[in-house]
Amino acid sequence: MKSSAKERWIRRFRDDDGCGTKLVCFPHAGGWTSAYGSWPLGLPADSGVLAVRYPGREDRLNDPFASDLEALADDIADALEELTRYRLVLFGHSMGASVAHEVALRLQKRGSPPAALCVSGRRPPHVLDAQRRLFGTDEEIIEGLVRMDGSRAAVFAEPDLREILLPAVRADFRLVDEYLGGHRPPLDCPVYGYTGDADPEVTPEQMRGWADMTSGAFRLRVLPGGHFYLRAEEAALLADIRRVLG
């Protein structure tokens, strides 16, 4: 029987016992699980597509935000425990890449490593020291968000939407800024990197640093676009992820 406490962490876009492989997706800072809502259409029907629901948003608005990124990873690893009997592939974009990596480390330490880790638009933990700080005043946060994703300007121009969305963004930006990263033990599973060729937050060369995070294979795919390249390039991204799932 599934634990309701653990289930609140997981949104299942497609999942049943016939899905022997399950793709678990980790949203970006301030992101919602809905970012992955269209993904089942582009992935094999026998692969589950799930997304991690961070606290303080969606139907978890009353749940307290995580105290730090590593505590968040602890809770998510606990929530995924019942799924480790399946073949898990983790995908994380931006902040979600760091969270997914920390969760992968925890699952490996518990003896249930994922089959693969996919990281997108995020520097590896040992080169985060020069990362631009995100947290600031509300106006500075919004300005930074709009600079990375112009489509967010209209959303934050609506006072009601701004009031709903900004607390989660603020909390996540603090997690990102306070996450020190550093060297981590290598994963046994392969790592696949993805990034936009014009991403202001990370260069392709910095993405190649993820190769140091695994004792297995590493492959980088660079696609056209900025930090949120994965929207316009969803078809190309999912075509590559189909190979990983297979």
Image (spheres, rainbow, N blue to C red):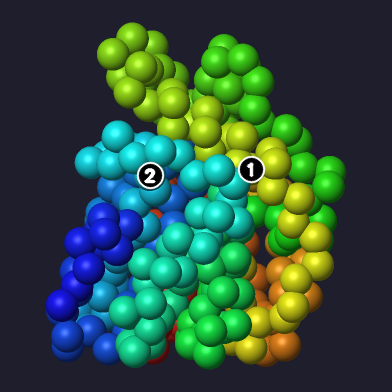
> Which residue is at 53% across, 38% downward?
172
Lower position in the chain sequence, tag 1 or tag 2: 2
Q: Which residue is mark 2?
A: 55
Q: CA distance from mark 1 to mark 2?
A: 15 Å
> Element under label 2?
loop
Where the N terminus falls, by quadrant? bottom left
Q: Which residue is mark 1?
A: 176
> Element under label 1?
helix
Whether residues under marks 1 and 2 lie with C-beta atoms below 8 angstroms apart, the answer is no
Q: Position of residue 227 (x, y in %)?
A: 57, 44
Image position of 106 with respect to 120: above or below? below
> Which residue is at 65% across, 21% downward?
136
Q: Residues within 10 Å of mark 2 (few under 14, many from 20)?
A: some
Q: Residues within 10 Å of mark 1 (few under 14, many from 20)?
A: many
Which kind of residue does numbered mark 1 sit on? Val
Q: Is residue 195 visible?
A: no
